[in-house]
Image (cartoon, rainbow, N blue to C red):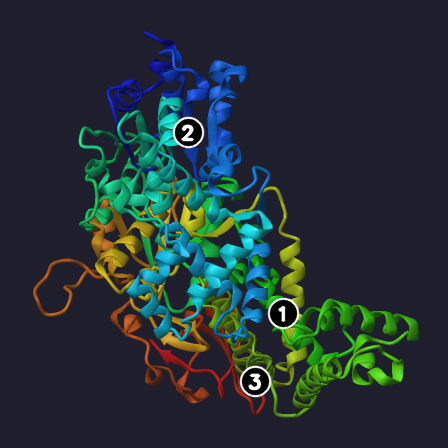
Amino acid sequence: MEEYLDKLNPQQRQAVEYLGGPELVIAGAGSGKTRVLTYKIVHLLAKGYEPWRIMALTFTNKAAREMRERIEALVGEKTSSRLWMGTFHSMFLRILRTNADLIGFKRDFTIYETADSKSLLKMIIKDMQLDEKLYNPSTVFNAISFAKNALYSPEAYRADADLMRSDKNARRPYIVDIYTAYRDRCRIAGAMDFDDLLFYTNVLLSSNPGLLNHYREFFKYVLVDEYQDTNHAQNSIITLLTQGQGDLCVVGDDAQSIYSFRGANIKFILNLRDQYPDLKTFKLERNYRSTQNIINAANTLIDKNSRQIHKEVFSENELGERINIVESYSDFEEGYLVANRISQVKMHSKDSYNDFAVLYRTNAQSRILEEALRKRNIPYRIYGGLAFYQRKEIKDVVAYLRLAINPDDDEAFKRVINTPARGIGETTVKKLAAAAIENNVSLWQVALDPAAYQLDINRGTKSKIEKFTGLISQFITRNNEDDIDAEAMTVEVIRESKILTMYASENTPESVSKKENIEELLNAARQFVEDKKEQGASDSMRLVDFLSEVSLATDQDAATGAEECVTLMTIHAAKGLEFDNVFIVGVEEDLLPSSMGRGSLAEIEEERRLLYVAITRAKKFCMMTYAKSRYINGQNKLCNPSRFLKDINIKYLKVGLGSQIAPPEIRPSHDSFERQRVLRPIGGNGSSRPTFKSDRSDSSVKNIAAGDFAQHTASELHSGAVIEHQRFGRGVITEIDTSTPDHKITVNFDNVSTKKLLLSFAKFKIIE
C-alpha cells in the first residue's frame, strides 16, 4: 500500500481512497480537513489522474497556498504547479479570460476593485440625480453584490416582485435602475467586478452547452474546500461542471456555517444529496486539536441545532479542564478579569502570549479589552483589523475633537474637511495647503478668510468652506464654556458632524460595525467623565484631558507589535485558527446571540454555530464570560447570560467566580467543582436545567437596577466593609478619609486593583 496512506486514520483513509462517485466529507473541527484534501489530490495523482484535469477550489489564497505547499512536498513542484488550484474567483477568471468573447467581453477585460465599483456607482447616482444619503454607494454596491451572487441579472431583478417591493419599502425604488446602468457602463468600459467573475462564469457555461461539455470532460475531478460557505453562484457553477459526471469531492462542516451575511447558504451542504442522489458521505469525527472536555461541551451545544448533519466528534487527547463560566459585574470588570486570568494562566502554564486569544462578537468590544491589557502590560494585536483608536471612523471623530481644541491642527483639518462629504475636493485642499505654506500659516487661517490669501476658488466652494469653518467655530466656542465636559463635547461633535448619521444610512455590515465603534468611543468619553467625578478629579474631565488619554492609548497601540502577543479578534475572524487558551467574552443575550440574529430559528442556529466555532478554537483551556451590565449606545444596560450557556451540559463546565487558577497538576477535581457550582431551576416549570451563578453570596448576584446602587455617607461605612460597585465589581474598603469636606474611600477591588472614590459621586451597594 502507498506510504502516504499510512499517515491517515481509518476515517480519513476511507474518504481519500473513495473514487466511486460524488463524495461529501463532513470534517468536524480539528479533524484534519486540509490533510484529507491534500492526500485526496495526491491519491488522484497516484491513480493516474493528470494534474491539469484536477480542479481544487478554496475560499482564500492562504488556504490554496498551504495546500499546494503540502502537495508539492509529496509529489514535487513540477506536478503540483500544473493543478488547477486556487480560489473560486482566480480559477473562474482563467475560464473567463479564455472564453470572454462568447459573452461579449474582450479577453483582456479589466477587473474593478471595490473602490473602482463604488466610484462608478457614485457617478451613476449623481447622474441620475438621486439622493446620495438614500442611495449611498456602499449600500447600493452591497445590494448589487447580493443580487449577482443570487444570479439575478438587472432584468431578473426587475421581474422579482418581492425584491422590488423591498426596495420600495426601503425608499430605494431605483436600485434596479442603478444596477442596470452599472452593468451597462462596466460593459462599455470592458470591466468586471469580483462578483461578475462568478456571475458571468454562470452565464458563460449555462448559455454555451458545447463549452460546458468541454469543461465537464476536461475536469476529471473537482474538489471544494469549506463547502458550507458556498453561495448560490458558487454552488451553481460547481453543479454545472460536475452534474452528470459525478467526479466531485466536497469537504466542509455544517456546524461551522457562520457566513450567511456574506451570502453563504447552509442548505447547499445539507441538501447536497438532492443534487447527487448517489452521494457517499464520510465523517471525520476524531478531533486532534482539543481536550475531551472542550469537545464534549461543544458537542452538547451544537446538538441543540435541528438543521445539521449529525456526527459524533470525539477527542483522544487528555481530559483537560472544564470550560470556565465567569460572571462579571460590568463590561469594564470583564476586561480586567480576562487580563488577570491571562496573566495567571501564563504564569502557571508557561505558555507564550502567542498561545492566547480573546474572541468577541463585535469589533467594538475590543476597546475595553485593549485598555485592560495595556494596564497589565500584556502585549496584544488585533487580528484582521486595527486597534480601536486606529480605526478610520474613530480617527475621524477624534480629528473633529482635536480641532475643537486646536483648529490649527493641519492633519486633523485635512482629515475631516470633506468627511462626511460636503463637496470640498482634493484640488481645493491642495490650494488651501499651498496658500498656507506660502504664507506660513495654518490651513485653518486660510480657510477662515480665503480672499485674504487670494485663494482661487469659486463662490460655491467658498460657501462650503464657510460652512465647515462655521461648524468648527461652533465646537471651539462650546468647548471653551465652563460647564462642558468630555462626554458632552463628544456627544455634540458626533451629532453635529453627522458622522454617525452617515454610517447609519449605509446599512451594510461594515457600516454597522463602524457605527458601533463610534458609539463605543462615546462610551469611553462617558466612562472617563464618570471615573473623574468618582475620584474627585472634576477639574480634569475636559475634552483636552480625555484626548490626552486617547493619545497615550494610541501610542501604546502602536507599541504592541512585539513578536509575542495575545490575539484579539472577532469569532468570525477566528474560524480556521487554533490557540492553546481561548477567552470568549460577552456571551450574553443581544450579543451572542446578536440582537440582529434573533428573527428566525435559522438565525438562532447560526448564532449557536458561531459559539461552537469559538469554543472549538481552544486546545487546552477555554473560558467564557458574561457581564451583568454593559455600556451599549451610551447607556448602561442590564444583561442576561446567553441562552446558549444553558445548552451545554453542566458536567463539562466549571461555573463560578473563577478569579483564581491552580497549576495544571493541582486543578480542582470533579468533587470540588460540584461543591462550588450553584444551580437553580429556570422559571417555575420545574425544569432541572441550570442557570449560571458565580459562587458569590446571594446578595451579590441580584439583577442590577438603578435603585440597587446608591450614594453612602462615611458614617454608614467602616474599614473592611465589602461593597459592590456597578463597574468595578466587588471590593473591600481599606481606608475612609474624612479629613476634607469631600469624603473619600479607598477600595481594593477583586479584579480592578485599588480605587479612590468620592462619596458624593460614587454609587455602590454595601454587601457586608
Q: Residue at x 50, y 43 (%)?
A: 104
Number of numbered callouts drawn: 3
Q: Which mark is residue 56?
A: 2
Q: Which mark is residue 718?
A: none
Taking the image as drawn, is residue 282 in sight?
Answer: yes
Q: Is residue 760 above or below residue 13?
A: below
Q: Is residue 420 left or right of residue 159?
A: right
Label 3 packing within 10 angstroms: few (<14), some (14-19), many (20+): some
* Screen quadrant of the C terminus: bottom left
What's under tag 1, amino acid-wise? Asp
Q: Residue beneath label 3, please? A: 488
Nearer to us in this view, 429 or 182: 182
Which residue is outermost to the left? 686
User: Could you say where residue 8 lies in the image, as x and y percent from the top left?
Assistant: 33, 19
User: Could you say where residue 294 lies in the image, as x and y percent from the top left?
Assistant: 30, 42
Which residue is outermost to the top? 1
Q: Residue beneath label 1, please? A: 396
Nearer to us in this view, 174 or 230: 174
Q: Residue at x 54, y 68 (%)?
A: 125
For label 2, the SS is strand
For label 1, the SS is helix
Nearer to us in this view, 651 or 733: 651
